[in-house]
Image (cartoon, grey):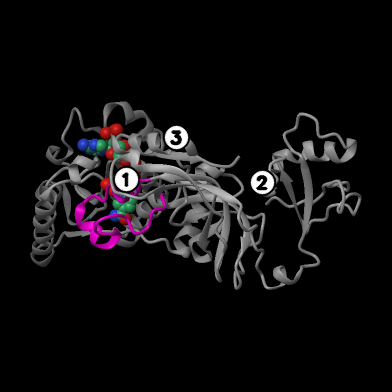
Amino acid sequence: MARASGMAISTVRKGRDEGRRGATPEDTVEVRRSAAKRPYEVAHPEEWPALEKIAATGSRADCGIVAIRLRSTRRPGPARRRGYTRPRKGVPVKAAVYAEYGPPDVVQIAEVEAPAPKDGEVLVEVHAASINPYDWHFVRGLPRLMRLVSGLRRPKDTRLGADVAGRVRAVGAGVTRFKPGDAAFGICRGSVAELVCAPESALVEMPANVSFAQAAAAGIAALTALQALRDKGRVRAGQTVLVNGAAGGVGTFAVQIARANGAGVTGVCSARNVELVKSIGADHVVDYTREDFTKSGRRYDLILDCVGNHSLGAFTRVLAARGTYVGVGGGGVRPEDFSGVAWTAAMLGRSIAQLVRNLFGRQKLTGLLAKGKTEDLETLRGLLASGEVTPVIDRRFALAEVRDALRYVEEGHARGKVVIGVHG
Ligand SMILES: NC(=O)c1ccc[n+]([C@@H]2O[C@H](COP(=O)([O-])OP(=O)(O)OC[C@H]3O[C@@H](n4cnc5c(N)ncnc54)[C@H](OP(=O)(O)O)[C@@H]3O)[C@@H](O)[C@H]2O)c1
């Protein structure tokens, strides 16, 4: 929480606020970092000592901050009384956008008008966003079938990103769980941007023990792992769980969540990731470059498949008699796996085979489309806060490097999550 509790700032800004009063726990400390007409941003707690010094000496030399102000919630103005702080009109913000389908090169960092929160929405200053295969699927419009929803000839929604962590800048009418200055994480379309509006229900408070980058990493990937294991797989203590693709975004969360539920976990990954997968709690690791787990003869109560690189028959061979297979990957990890009619034919065949096996067999074969439910984000919040789950971050990119981040994820060998640092 970026509250001013305990701060001794009494001199704030030249002019109107100077010498007005000392900070109270109800205040948020905001700073302006450049003489150019940029909006005030909520100060980071790490900056407080520097701010105290400025307040004491009046000198702002070499600190990169040109003005400080306290935003009080004690005497709300008319707009704040309605629960809504209007963002400054006409101030452009940077956002990653794409106007046509294609490789990562079609993504541009553009200046767009600052969004304003509607009723029930929260305006978030994005500190970090993370990239999922979901993002390149939308940018490329692959598999082509998805264009029925995302836009036949060109994308209907040109914003990039879904996972977000940042500070609340303003709230729309009716928002009760957040106020300006709160740190929050969750899911919202267009998160690769400086400012974004998210429905209140798609965000939860960030635990104090994780960074913005870690919180942003725990979006779609962590929700997918949680919902696949708990809701579809009904994971429980003592079960044997196999995670195919254990070193990726979903897999690294799945290994930890299965472990936190008391299951014995086997992770499947390449040789270079064996130690990583062991370090996050896997009891056994299969290096797929040396061994094909579908021919091992070992059986598992629950298989979470994040790759889709074996036939259903191969998976059921190593599934216990009453075991559950949950497929979250759509038949590959790279764009070329999803192009052409071959993918559509393979998926159709797989769906029919799944239906038939479910009708006549005792094993359960199912898939999942993750949903951004508030209660599940709260569950993730608890797992992060308790330390049972720690996001694995592979690489960090700046906002301007978002195309490189997409290219990297498209290679299909991310080790955990890829994060875009925006503010801070
Ligand atoms: N249904 C949903 O709601 C949903 C939600 C999120 C994600 N997904 C899908 O789930 C899949 C995984 O997502 P993600 O975020 O984990 O992707 P990711 O972060 O890009 O992970 C890719 C991982 O796949 C592993 N891999 C590649 N080839 C493999 C192989 N032959 N055997 C085992 N592992 C292999 C890589 O490990 P190595 O480098 O060790 O090979 C890498 O760590 C994607 O297809 C994504 O679209 C679906």
Assign ligand 1 to one image quadrant: top left
Question: Could you tell me the amino acid type at mark 2?
Answer: Arg
Distance from the alpha carbon under mark 3 to that under mark 1? 15 Å
Q: Which residue is mark 2?
A: 38
Q: Within 10 Å of the Cα at label 2, are there few (<14), some (14-19), or many (20+) other Cα atoms?
A: few
**Is residue 246 shown to the viewer in this render?**
no
Image-based side of 383 in relation to 236, left or right: right
Q: Secondary structure at mark 2?
A: loop
Image-based side of 118 in relation to 297, left or right: right
Q: Within 10 Å of the Cα at label 1, are there few (<14), some (14-19), or many (20+) other Cα atoms?
A: many
Question: Could you tell me the amino acid type at mark 1?
Answer: Trp
Question: Could you tell me the amino acid type at mark 3?
Answer: Glu
Of the image marks 2 and 1, the number of the one nearer the N terminus? 2
Where does residue 40 sit, x and y in percent of width and height? 70, 49
Q: Which residue is mark 1?
A: 136
The residue positioned 65% from the left and 63% from the top of the image is 86
Q: Secondary structure at mark 1?
A: helix
Between 240 and 62, the residue placed more toward the observer is 62
Q: Secondary structure at mark 3?
A: helix
Distance from the alpha carbon under mark 2 to that under mark 1? 31 Å
Distance from the alpha carbon under mark 2 to that under mark 3? 22 Å
Q: Which residue is mark 3?
A: 401
Disc ID at residue 347: none
Magenta range is 132-160
Where does residue 315 sit, x and y in percent of width and height? 15, 48
270 vs 97: above or below: above
Of the image marks 2 and 3, the number of the one nearer the N terminus? 2
Label 3 lies in ligand 1 vicinity (Cβ under 8 Å): no
175 vs 239: above or below: below
Where does residue 180 sit, x and y in percent of width and height? 66, 58
On whether residue 370 falls in the magenta region, the answer is: no
108 vs 235: above or below: above
